[in-house]
Amino acid sequence: MKLQIPYDDLRGWIGLAGEVGEVRAVEGASWQEEIGMAAELLNHSDPAPAVLFDKIPGYPQGHRILVNFFGGRRKNMTLGLPAELNNFQLSQAFTEAFQAVTPIPCEFVDDGPILENIRTGDDVNVLSFPTPLWHELDGGRYIGTGSFNVTQDPEERWVNLGTYPVMVHDEKSVGFYISPGKHGRIHRDKYFARQEPMPAAIVIGGDPLLFLMTCTEIPYGVSEYEIAGGLRGKPCRVIKGKVTGLPIPANAEIVLEGFVDPKKRKPEGPFGEWTGYYGSGLRDEPYMDVKAIYYRNNPIMLGCPPQRPPDEISRYRSILRSGFLKQALEKAGLSGIKAAWASEVGNTRMLLCIAIEQRYAGHATQVGHVASQCHVGAYAGKYVVVVDDDIDVSNLEEVVWAMITRSDPATSIDIIRNAWSTPLDPRIPPEDRAKGQMTNSRAIIDATRPYAWRDKFPAVNLPSAEVARKTREKFSYLLEGYK
C-alpha cells in the first residue's frame, strides 16, 4: 500500500488535524507546571486531542508548543494511511510501504522558512523559547523531547538523525545523553577519539513523518532523510547549516546548531524517561555549545515527553517497530511467523510478543532467541513471549492468558545473560552502573502448546468463527451505548 502523506511540515500537519477536529487550543498555561500536567493527562489517554499551547506567560504570543500529536484518527493521517485501519493493520501497512521504499537523497536549497530568524554570537539565547518542565522531579527544562539531532560520521560521511532528550543548561548550552551503541553515539565516539568537537544540529518542531523515522531502527549508514523522502515520494528539502555545514530541514520550526567538545562536561538530569522512571540521577555529560539558532516566525515546539508506559511514545513506536520485528525474523530465515507486536506496556522494547504456526520442535525457542537479539529487539529488551497463532499478540490479556496456561515456569523459560542494555534500565544494580556495566538478561518464554503433544492439548472454550459471527449479527445490539 502506497502512503498518501498530505502535509510537508508541522504547520501543514496541524492544519489537517484541525480540519478533522483533532486539535484544541489552550492559552495561558504556564511552562513551570501546567503544560507538563496537561501533557501527562493527554499522553495517557487515547483517544485524546492534540493540544496547541499559546500565550504562555513570560513569552511572546505565537511562541507555541504542540503536544500529543500521535493519537486518535490523526495517527492514520500522520502515516498517510486510510482512516479505517486499526493499530495492527497500520503497522502491517506501514511496514509494507517501508519495505518497498526506494531512498531519495535530500535536496539542498538556498532558502526556507527556517531562515526567517537567525541568531548568532551574543544573540544566541535558548531560554527565549518557552521550554516546559515536563515532570515535577526533572532536573531542568528539556527543550528536546519531540526533537531529533543531526550528526555526520567523521570518516564515512553519512548523516544520521536520532532522537535524544535535550536539556537546557543555560542561554548558550544544551546537553543530550546518547546511549552506547546508538548511531549518534558512534559518531560522537569517533570524534572524541580524534579529540575533535562533534558538529551537531538539533531540530525542534520538524516534519512529523521525518520525526517518526528518527525514532525508527534505520540500518547503519542510511540517512533518515533518504527514507522519509522515499516514503513521501520526493526529497527532503534541506539547507546547509551556516556553522557546521550539516543539512537542516528548510521547513523546520526551530534549529539549534553548534559543537560538542570532548573535553567539556556539565551536570545533566535527572529526567523522567521512557521506562517510566527517572533512569539516572545528576551526572556529568557532554553538552553542545550553541553557536546559532534558526527559527520561523511564531515558532512551534513539538513536545513528546516520555511518561510511564503505555503513553504517546509507546503508541507510535508500537506501530512502527512491530512490523519491523516481524520483518527481521523473516529476514533471519524463520518460517511460520504470523504476527509480532512490540508491546506498548514495555514501551515497545521490554516486552516483545510473537505468534507462530509451529512447524518443528524448538521452533518457538528459535524465534524467541532471534527476536531478543536482532537489531529491533536487542536494545534494552527484557521479555520475549512466543505464542500460537490463535493469540492476538497486540492484546496483552490474550498474551498473558497464553503465557500462564501454556508455559511451564520450570521448563518453558530460557535466560540470556550479558545483553545490550542502557543506563536508563532501572533494574541495573547501582554498583554495575557505577562501573559502566550496562548489560541485562533476557527471558525467552515459550507460551505455545508443547510441540510434542500439541494435538492433545485441551481445546479452548471459545465459540468457532462461524458461531462468533452469528453471535455478533444477532446480539451486538445488546452492547449499544456501552464501552
Image: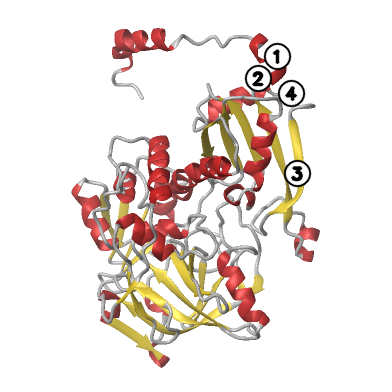
x and y, in percent, of residue 238 in the image:
34, 74
- Measured Cα–Cα span from mark 2 to mark 4: 10 Å
Q: Which label lies toward us, 2 or 4?
A: 2
Q: Which label lies toward us, 3 or 1?
A: 1
- Kind of residue sitting beneath label 1: Trp
x and y, in percent, of residue 79 in the image:
34, 49
Count residues near mark 4 (Cα–Cα under 10 Å), then give few for <14, some for 14-19, many for 20+: some
> Mark 2 = which residue?
449
Count residues near mark 1 (Cα–Cα under 10 Å), then give few for <14, some for 14-19, many for 20+: few
> Mark 1 = which residue?
453
Q: Residue at x 60, y 27 (%)?
A: 387
Q: Is residue 323 above or below residue 10?
A: above
Residue closest to the eye, 473 or 102: 102
* Element class at badge 1: helix
Q: Which of marks 2 and 4 is nearer the N terminus?
A: 4
> Mark 4 = which residue?
408
Q: In this view, does 302 lie above or below 77?
A: below
